[in-house]
Each structure stands twice: as C-alpha cells, then as structure tokens.
Image: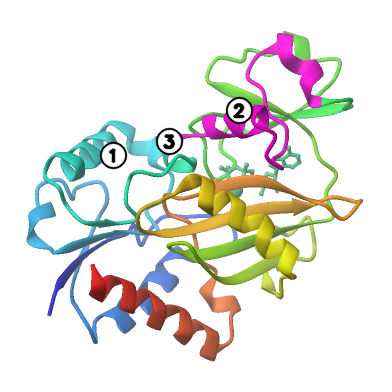
Amino acid sequence: MKTILYLTDFYYVAKGRAYYREDLYITSKLKNYFNILIGHPHQANSYLEYADIIIFRNTGSVMKYEPYFREFVHNVKHKGLLTFNSFDGKGDQRGKNYLLYLTRIHFPVIPTVDKLQKLDRLGISESYMVKMKNGADSIGQQQINIEDIHSIELSGKIIQPFIDFIYEVSFVYLNDRFQYAVYAPQKDKRWELIEYIPSASDIAFADQFIQWNHLTRGITRIDACRLQDGTLLLVELEDLNPFLSLQVLTKNKQEIFIKNWIEILQAM
Ligand SMILES: Nc1ncnc2c1ncn2[C@@H]1O[C@H](COP(=O)(O)OP(=O)(O)O)[C@@H](O)[C@H]1O
Ligand SMILES: [Mg+2]
C-alpha cells in the first residue's frame, strides 16, 4: 500500500462550509486503499518525505501562512515530491493575475484590470468589485461605486465590473475530466448548493479553462456566473484547494467521484 500525507486544516472556519466533514469522508474512503497520515498545512514541511503522495486539500486561504506555504511549494519542487494537486497550475494557485491575462486574450472571464487608466476596458458599469490578487474566501473584497473608484488604492489588487449575475455554478474536474457541477440557485446564498446538470456547451465552457491551465495532476473547480443574457463568465479558476461540496451529491455520485480519484492516485 502506498502512503498518503493528507494535509488539511480541520478547524478552518469557512462561510457555510464544513471543510472538516468533507475531509473526514474522503479520508475514510481513501484509507481502504492507502495508508493515511493526516497533517496540518502549517507544520508539514518537516515530514514531507514520509509519504509517497501528498494531498493538499481543504487547507484554507494560504494568505494566512504565505511564507510557510511558499517554503512548502519550494520543498515539493526541490525534492521532487508527488503532490495532488501538482503546483504547476496558472490559476488561483498563483493568485488572481491569471484573470488579467485571460481578459487580454479574450477568454470569457469577468473583465479584469489592475490599473485605473484601464478602467474603460471593463465597459460601462455603475459599480465595481475590487479584490486582492492573493485573496481567497472573499477576504479584502469590496464593492465600490463609480464615484469612489478613482480614489481607490490599487496596489496588489484587481478591479472588475460588479456583475448582476443570475446564479453561480461550479464545475469540478479530476485532472482534465469533468466530474460534476453544483450551483447556488439563490444568489445571496452562495454556499447553499444543489447539483447542476450541465449542457454540452456549459461543459465546453469549463473545458477551455482546464485545457488552458494544463495542470499535471489535481482537482480543479471552475467557478462561473450566469449572466442575465444566458452567457457564462469565469469568476475563478480554483486549482489549489477547491472545496468540493461532495455532500450535495447523491451517495452514488460521491462514490463515483472517489473511485475515479482513487484510480488516479493508484496510477501515480
Ligand atoms: N465581479 C463581481 N461582481 C459581482 N459579484 C462578484 C464578482 N466577483 C466575485 N463576486 C462574488 O464574490 C464571491 C467571491 O469572489 P471570488 O472571485 O470567487 O473570490 P475568492 O477568491 O475570495 O473566492 C463570488 O463567489 C461571487 O459571489
Ligand atoms: Mg471564490
């Protein structure tokens, strides 16, 4: 049996989500196929070599322990450790800069700039969303009216138009394979999710980001918003430690997801 070091912060408090419950479920399933060591992401650097595979899971926002996290990623690269996710993604695992790039190359993302001189590239908007480039869990996120936007301090931040979307939908992938989607039909309740059955064009939408990101191994969540005219725009390409909302799925679908994941881990 291979050994997995499963990194998670059971006590991380996230709005509307019980991270630890998901990890208790996942580890209870993985333990039938692997030896499981459970570690805390804030103190794993001294025992990384004890496992064949390191799973980086519901570890919370890395903002709160950024230097230690950087050291972790450095160790993984220099010691050639096998991690899931791999750390070669271009999405959220490197902060929100990818949104600037995807905007420039005309991918369907919420238009994003990081300089006030470029505000006109966002189209007409009465209000804006300002976010920290290294933010997560909505930390530091602010809605700003057009009258106030010119006086905002923008270093380390991005600006987007404030979008009046209908709902948010998340597409979950294992490597480059779509697994399931969930959505929040009530927009003010972002984490009250139910399963969403995507159309072929919804999946094609999400696939293009997976292909662009080209992550070697991992779980990716593509978060999108549905606009009033029916189109989808990317909100976030979460390729570091997406919460999976597995509890929303039927038992059968949960098991299929776990089975697919175990197959990938066994082949690593
Ligand atoms: N441009 C926007 N307009 C309106 N709402 C937004 C916008 N960007 C984000 N949001 C809302 O804020 C939430 C968090 O934003 P997100 O970009 O996913 O940041 P985080 O990294 O903090 O998860 C989204 O799920 C969505 O509900
Ligand atoms: Mg998000």
Please tell me whether residue 232 is drawn above or below residue 163 in the rendered image. Answer: below
Which secondary structure lies at badge 3? helix
The quarter of the picture showing ligand 1: top right
Q: Earlier in the sequence, mark 2 or mark 3?
A: 3
Between the C-alphas of marks 3 and 1, the distance is: 12 Å
Crowding near the residue tagged with mark 2, few <14, some 14–19, many ≥20 C-alpha atoms within 10 Å: some
From which residue to which does the magenta span run? 94-122
Task: Classify 95 as above or below 148.
Answer: below
Instruction: Tell whether 108 sits left or right of 101.
Output: right
**Which residue is found at the position 25% from the left and 36% from the top?**
68
Spot the residue most to the bottom.
Answer: 252
Q: Which mark is residue 69?
A: 1
Instruction: Kindly identify the amino acid type of the residue bearing the numbered disc 1.
Output: Phe
Question: Considering only order in the chain, which callout, 2 or 1, is on the residue closer to the N terminus?
Answer: 1
Amino acid tagged 2:
Leu
Check if residue 134 falls in the magenta segment: no
User: In the drawing, what numbered circle is on residue 94?
Assistant: 3
